């Protein structure tokens, strides 16, 4: 898993094409000289027209950027996908069981399988959730699982996103764009559809409506507003599933129920898909200075009169220190071995482990336990000595705030860049919906590191996206 030649998803070591990519390889051979270049320009025009942008905080070049889109799809065979989706389903079931347990009897702590301090003193643990019974016992209804590949049969989970996983709108729009750009390629490959995600999201949200809902549940998407980096996605998903897009002031609580202000008077809201952080959802329970939330919302939720998706306090299950225990969590709740492996992870609390980390920092990746978006990371092989020394000081000061992993040789996919078609590193974020059943969209969002040799795929750090094709048999 160290510094070996990365696995190429399209080509075998002898240069022959791997079976899932055979139709694509033939199609690429048939493209005229400037064919892919023209497709790329067309794709950019499509995304500009749709207004698919994301905000870059602290950037000098204005706030809105277009995420680069690569016109060569990433392809996963039906067999590979079956294996992956079984592992993903097992993982999300175990994580929901874990959340139920730590907010109720805390059996896993009593059994000594996970340190009490790691849970109860964690900033992502939400004491207000203790003893609360969410609809259908589901805490994390929408999960994005970040997966990397290092070989033909080697998939690893890099992290679990259980708070408010983003990027699903890019998965949907990437597919839409590819269908416009390369309809002939779709005719050659039997590709599993992703476009039913909004409908499945709506079904999932309706299935967790409170018991006292009368008629068809009213669903609202709660957004922090137009200045949020994922605002495009909030409005896109609300529109696609026929839900209301609301900001905090559009909602109010009366008599323990939540209502939406409309031109025809108040309308009761049953399910809120919130895209704002725990701390901001209700100034009466959490941060009193929050202008984004709804006063009294948490009490209405506690009383069972509204469902919050995802539940507050789910962040404890995607905490990077808790991540190291997920194989243990799968075994404890399901009595099964984890089908998908974690990346081997070191914590820095133990002094011997810390000494080993310091000796090998140039080969390792250091992540903040609560960091996200590729910020606050050290990638050893591409770091300077000064930066490594800086990180040693940070780890010494707060050893519990960092985890350390080997630098993985992430798989590569053919990608259209300025110099032509070249291999670039990719990861994958499949999206999972959990309500009355577990629904996994075939494929997900493939993120690609567009800089040669780079392993950082985050859009905030210059990465792009690809359409992900799961082949049907």
Image (cartoon, helix red, strand yellow):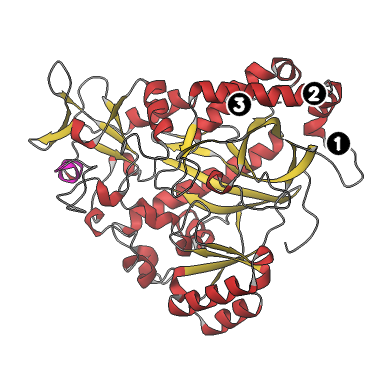
- Among the two numbered marks 2 and 3 on one chain, the one whose residue lies closer to the N terminus: 2
For the residues carrying marks 1 and 3, which lies nearer the camera in this image? 3
What's the residue at 75%, 25% (across, down)? 36
Instruction: Return the residue nearer the eye: 318 or 451.
Output: 451
Q: Residue most toward the right?
A: 14
According to the picture, the residue beneath numbered tag 3 turns out to be: 44
Q: Is 29 situated above or below 155?
A: above
The crowding category of the residue bearing disc 2, from other C-alpha atoms within 10 Å (few below 14, some 14 to 19, many at least 20), is few
State the image coordinates of residue 472 (x, y, percent, origin top left).
68, 26
Task: Please give the residue where the numbered disc 2 appears in the rendered image.
Answer: 34
Q: Is residue 259 above or below residue 464?
A: above
Image quadrant occupied by the C terminus = top right
Foreground residue, 414 or 162?
A: 414
Query: Which residue matches tag 1?
Result: 17
Mark 1 Cα shell of 10 Å, populated few (<14), some (14-19), many (≥20) = some
**Residue at 61%, 60% in the rendered image:** 343
Label 2 with label 3: CB-CB less than 8 Å: no
The nearer-to-camera label among 2 and 1 is 2
Whether residue 54 appears in magenta in the rendering, the answer is no
Rendering coords of residue 292 (x, y %): 24, 42
Instruction: Write down the region rendered in magenta.
Output: 295-301
Mark sitting earlier along the chain (1/3): 1
Question: Where is the N terminus found, in terms of image quarters?
Answer: bottom right
Q: Residue 106 lies in what quarter of the image? A: bottom left
Residue 408 falls left or right of residue 143: right
Q: Quick one: 345 or 239, which is closer to the camera?
A: 239
Residue 266 at x, y percent in the picture: 13, 23
Rendered image quadrant of residue 55: top left
- How far is the residue under mark 2 from the one under mark 3? 16 Å
Q: Are marks 1 and 3 in contact (CB under 8 Å)?
A: no
Residue 404 position within the rendered picture, expressed as x and y whole percent measured from the top left: 57, 68
At numbered mark 2, what does the secondary structure look like: helix, strand or loop? loop
């Amino acid at each position: 898993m160290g510094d070996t030649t990365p696995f190429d998803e399209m080509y075998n070591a002898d240069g022959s094409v791997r079976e899932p990519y055979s139709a694509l390889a033939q199609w690429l051979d048939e493209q005229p000289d400037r064919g892919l270049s023209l497709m790329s320009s067309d794709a950019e025009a499509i995304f500009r027209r749709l207004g698919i942008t994301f905000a870059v905080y602290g950037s000098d070049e204005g706030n809105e950027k277009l995420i680069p889109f690569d016109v060569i799809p990433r392809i996963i065979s039906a067999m590979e996908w079956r294996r992956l989706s079984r592992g993903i389903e097992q993982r999300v079931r175990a994580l929901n069981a874990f959340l139920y347990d730590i907010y109720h009897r805390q059996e896993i702590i009593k059994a000594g399988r996970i340190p009490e301090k790691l849970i109860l003193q964690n900033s992502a643990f939400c004491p207000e959730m203790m003893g609360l019974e969410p609809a259908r016992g589901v805490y994390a209804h929408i999960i994005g699982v970040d997966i990397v590949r290092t070989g033909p049969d080697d998939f690893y989970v890099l992290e679990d996103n259980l708070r408010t996983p983003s990027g699903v709108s890019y998965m949907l729009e990437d597919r839409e764009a590819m269908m416009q750009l390369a309809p002939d390629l779709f005719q050659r490959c039997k590709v599993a559809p992703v476009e039913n995600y909004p409908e499945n999201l709506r079904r999932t949200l309706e299935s967790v409506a409170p018991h006292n809902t009368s008629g068809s549940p009213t669903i609202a998407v709660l957004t922090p507003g137009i200045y949020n980096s994922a605002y495009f996605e909030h409005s896109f998903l609300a529109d696609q599933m026929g839900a209301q897009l609301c900001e905090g002031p559009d909602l109010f609580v009366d008599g323990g129920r939540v209502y939406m202000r409309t031109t025809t008077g108040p309308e009761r809201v049953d399910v809120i898909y919130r895209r704002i952080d725990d701390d901001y959802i209700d100034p009466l329970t959490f941060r009193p200075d929050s202008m984004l939330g709804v006063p009294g919302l948490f009490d209405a939720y506690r009383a069972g009169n509204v469902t919050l998706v995802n539940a507050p306090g789910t962040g404890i299950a995607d905490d990077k220190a808790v991540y190291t225990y997920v194989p243990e969590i799968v075994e404890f709740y399901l009595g099964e071995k984890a089908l998908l492996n974690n990346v081997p992870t070191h914590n820095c609390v133990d002094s011997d482990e810390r000494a080993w980390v310091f000796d090998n920092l140039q080969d390792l990746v250091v992540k903040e336990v609560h960091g996200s978006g590729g910020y606050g990371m050290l990638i050893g092989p591409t770091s300077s000595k000064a930066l490594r020394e800086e990180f040693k000081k940070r780890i010494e000061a707060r050893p519990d705030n960092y985890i350390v992993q080997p630098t993985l040789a992430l798989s590569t996919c053919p990608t259209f860049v300025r110099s032509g078609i070249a291999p670039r590193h990719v990861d994958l974020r499949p999206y999972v919906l959990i309500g009355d059943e577990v629904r996994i969209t075939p494929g997900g969002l493939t993120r690609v590191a567009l800089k040669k040799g780079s392993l950082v795929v985050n859009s905030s750090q210059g990465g792009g996206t690809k359409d992900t094709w799961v082949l049907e048999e």
